[in-house]
Amino acid sequence: MISATHTFPRGFKWGSATAAHQVEGHAQNSDWAQWETLPGKIKENGSAAVACDWWGGRWREDFDRAAADGQTTHRLSVDWSRIEPRPAVWDDEALDHYRQMVSGLRERGIEPMVTLHHFTNPLWLVEKGGWENPAVVSHFERFARKVVSVLGDHVDWWCTINEMNVYAYNSYAEGIWPPGKKDIRLCFTAIRHMLMAHAAAYRAIHELQPHARVGVAPNILLFDPARPDFALDARVASFQARSFYEAIPQALHTGKLLFPVGGWRERLPGVAGTMDFFGVNYYGRRLTAFDLNHPGTLFGRTFHSAEAEVDNMGLNELYPEGLFRVIKWAAGFGKPIAITENGWGDNDEGRRTRAMLGHVRQLWRAVNFNLPVQAYFYWSLVDNFEWERGWTQRFGLYELDLETQARTPRAAAKLYAEICKSNTLTAEMAARYAPEVVPAMFPG
Ligand code: FCB
C-alpha cells in the first residue's frame, strides 16, 4: 500500500459545532420550545426535551471529550430566549452559565466561536412579529452588545446568524419551522432584516471589541444542472444558487441584495463590508432540472442523481468534491474561511467515516491551493436534536443514549481524533477506517 501523509499547516484549527437548542435541553421560553409541543411538527413526535443535558451541566464531560480528542476549537451558540427572557431584562444566571461554558472551553485549550442566533427566538420577539418586523434589527443589536460585554473576555470569534437562508426558507416559505408561514415575500423580508441585524451587530461588536472577528454561516447547497448541456437546466440551477446562498455574501460585500427572482434588488445601508470571515456550512449538492411544474423553486426540480451516494434519509449526497468547489468560490470574497459546519448524519457507520475521509481530503486540497481556509468544525460533537427531524437523524461523533445520557464514541470519533491530534490525514488511516476508499484516494 502506498504511504502518504497529507499535512495541514501548523495552527490549523480542528473542532466541532453545536447549537444551543439542539444540545442544552430544558428550554421553555423560545419559539422552538413551544413549536415542539404542537402535534405533527417533529418526526416521531420528538422534542429537544433534556437533549444532551448541557443546561444540566453535561457540557463539561462533552468538552472533556473534545479536548481529549485533540480538538482545539468549538463552535457553540447562545439561546437568546434564556439570556433576555423579556425585552431588555437580562437573566444573569443564564449569562453566567454561558460564561462558565466559554471559560470551560478555554481551560481545556479549546478556542470558542460563539453564534448569537441559531434558529431559535424568544417568545416576546415572536409576539412583536419576529424577523418580519424591522424592529428586530435594534433588538438583535442590543442582545449582541450584552453577550459580547459578558463573554468578551473569553471570546473574540463571533458568528452573528446561522444559516439565515435555511431559517428564512423553512420558517417563511416552506412553513415547516416556526412561525410556520408560507409566503415567499416574508422570506425575503426575513433575509433583509437578518442582513441588517447582522450588520448592526457587526458594528456593535467591533465597538466593544475592535479586534473581534465577526462573520456569518450560510448554508451552501450546490445546485448542479441535471443535464449540463441543456441551457435551461444550467440557467435555473444558477438562479437557485444565486437566490439561496450567493445573495448573502454578495450583500455583505457590496451592500446590495440581488435576488434574480422578479429582478428583486435593494440597497441595504450599512451592510457593505461587514464580514471579517466567511463561515461555510456545507452538506452536499442537488441536481436541478428545468420544470414548469415547480414555480416555488424557481422552475427547477431538484433531486439526487441515480448514481449519487446518499444518507439513509435520502437528504444529502456524499459529494466531498463539493467542499473544495465551495471553498474556491467562497475565497472570491477575499476573506479568511472557516468551515463552520460539515458532517454526515446516517445510520451507516461506514458511510460516516468515508464521508469524513473524503471531506478532510478535499479540505487539504483547498489548503494546498492556498485557499484561505483556517478552521474546520465537524457537525456535531454528540448526537443532538435535529429540528423537524427530531432524533431520527444522528450526526454525532459520539452516539447519545437519550434514556441514560450515555455517550459512546463512533468510529468517526476515533478517526477524527487521529486527524486532529496529528494535524494530518494519512493513507494508513484510510486503510484502517475505510479500506475500500484507498485505491481511489491513494492510487499507487
Ligand atoms: C444545519 C444546521 C444545524 C444542523 C445541521 C445538520 O443546517 O445549522 O443546526 O441541524 O444542519
Image (cartoon, helix red, strand yellow):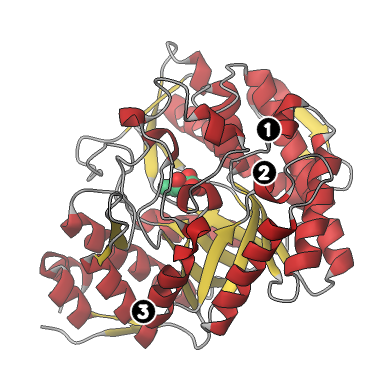
Could you tell me which quadrant the N terminus lies in?
Answer: bottom left
Q: Are marks 2 and 1 in contact (CB under 8 Å)?
A: yes
Q: For residue 371, say whether it is visible.
A: yes
Q: Position of residue 433 (x, y in %)?
A: 17, 71
Q: Residue at x 83, y 71 (%)?
A: 209
Of helix, strand and loop, which one carries label 2?
helix
Q: Are marks 3 and 1 in contact (CB under 8 Å)?
A: no
| Front residue (pair 379, 43) | 43
- In this picture, residue 379 sits left or right of residue 393: right
Badge 3 or badge 1: first in the primary sequence: 3
- Amino acid at circle 1: Leu
Q: Are marks 2 and 3 in contact (CB under 8 Å)?
A: no
Badge 2 or badge 1: first in the primary sequence: 2
Q: Determine which residue is flagged by label 2.
A: 81
Q: Determine which residue is flagged by label 3.
A: 69
- Amino acid at circle 2: Ser
Give the answer, above or below, for where 83 lies relative to 183.
Answer: below
